[in-house]
Image (tube, coloured by chain):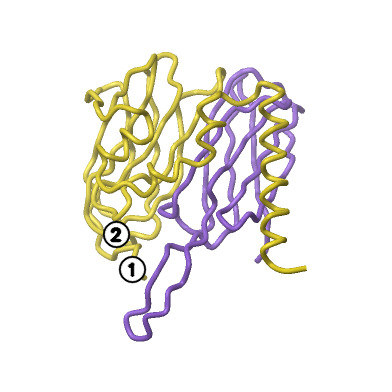
Chain colours: A yellow, B purple
Amino acid sequence: MNSKRRTLLKGSLAAGAVGVAVSAGLLAPRTVLAAWPKSAFSAKGVDASLSELYGSGDASSSKSIKLKAPDIAENGAVVPVTVSSSIANAESISIFVAKNPQPLTSSYALGSGTEAYVATRIKMGKTSDVVAVVKAGGKLYSAQKEVKVTIGGCGG
Amino acid sequence: MAKSIKVRASNKKGLTTVKALMSHPMKVEKKDKKTGKVTPAHFIQTVTCEHNGKAVLTAEWGAAISANPYLSFKFNGAKVGDSLKISWVDNKGENASVDAKIK
């Protein structure tokens, strides 16, 4: 039993789980096709990453998105970020750090009854704008806030 | 590596607030300046949260999420006592899942 075979087994198991979810109609087709949007995560620059993720890089600035993040983060390895929005029918939320080598930190697909609210902790390499993008009704809305970082979290 | 997920889900007037803490190293690909040795990235890629078998939140993460990730979200339509399933898969194919009761 070699290691390649183990990986293959694990891979096929994961694929099986996704298959079950699809047949039960749980996942939106987009989520299924792009199992994990590698190109969006490896893209450089917020706009490039946005287009890879949503197919469009145009996000209009909106005051209906609340982006909560500290003004100064002492430790860039752990920066608490909360995104909430009052935009109706939000489908997806994503969080970017403009000056990280790979700006996209995370993307969240919301179910029908899920509030447009996500809180998590992200890593920041250096002082940068944190950008939150909300997708609702096929349009993109964004909000941003600068967070000053005293110790970067991407080098170690 | 301990594969555990801690979940707290509380229901208030129909709105369920979920807070989850996962234990995972969440490593970024790193190259040692002296030896040139590359430590591969190791991070959670997908987190799925299901309520009664229906996906309420699917998170896709990159390596820029902090170690031992924290995730919180809110959703409608659940009752006290309902079960909530949270599971993750990382880029090495490792995975974990947990079932929690909504309180």
Q: Earlier in the sequence, mark 1 or mark 2?
A: 2
Q: Which mark is residue A125?
A: 2
Viewer-nearest residue: B4 or A22: A22
Quadrant in which the C terminus of chain B is drawn: top right
Viewer-nearest residue: A71 or A76: A76
What's the residue type where badge 1 is placed? Gly
**Are the two marked residues, 1 and 2, in contact with CB atoms closer than 8 angstroms?**
yes
Numbered disc 2: secondary structure = loop
Q: Position of residue B39 (x, y in %)?
A: 46, 72
The image quarter in which residue A26 lies: top right
Mark-to-mark CA distance, 1 and 2: 7 Å
Residue at 61 percent across and 49 percent down: it is B89
Q: Is residue A66 above or below residue B8?
A: above
Answer with left or right where residue A94 lies relative to residue A151: right
Is residue A65 at all visible to an observer of this figure?
Answer: yes
Is residue B103 at all visible to an observer of this figure?
Answer: no
Viewer-nearest residue: B52 or B8: B52
Q: Position of residue A86 (x, y in %)?
A: 38, 19
The image quarter in which residue A5 lies: bottom right
Circle count: 2
Answer with left or right where residue A151 lies relative to residue B23: left
- Circle 2 marks a residue in which chain? A
User: In the image as oriented, which residue stretches furthest toward the bottom?
Assistant: B34
Classed neighbour count for the residue bearing mark 2: other residues with Cα under 10 Å, few (<14), some (14–19), many (≥20): many
Q: Position of residue B58 (x, y in %)?
A: 55, 34
Residue at 73 percent across and 25 percent down: it is B52
What's the residue type where badge 2 is placed? Gly
Classed neighbour count for the residue bearing mark 1: other residues with Cα under 10 Å, few (<14), some (14–19), many (≥20): some
Q: Which mark is residue A31?
A: none
Q: Please name the residue that numbered disc 1 is placed on.
A: A155
Quadrant in which the N terminus of chain B is drawn: bottom right
Q: Is residue A58 above or below residue B48?
A: above
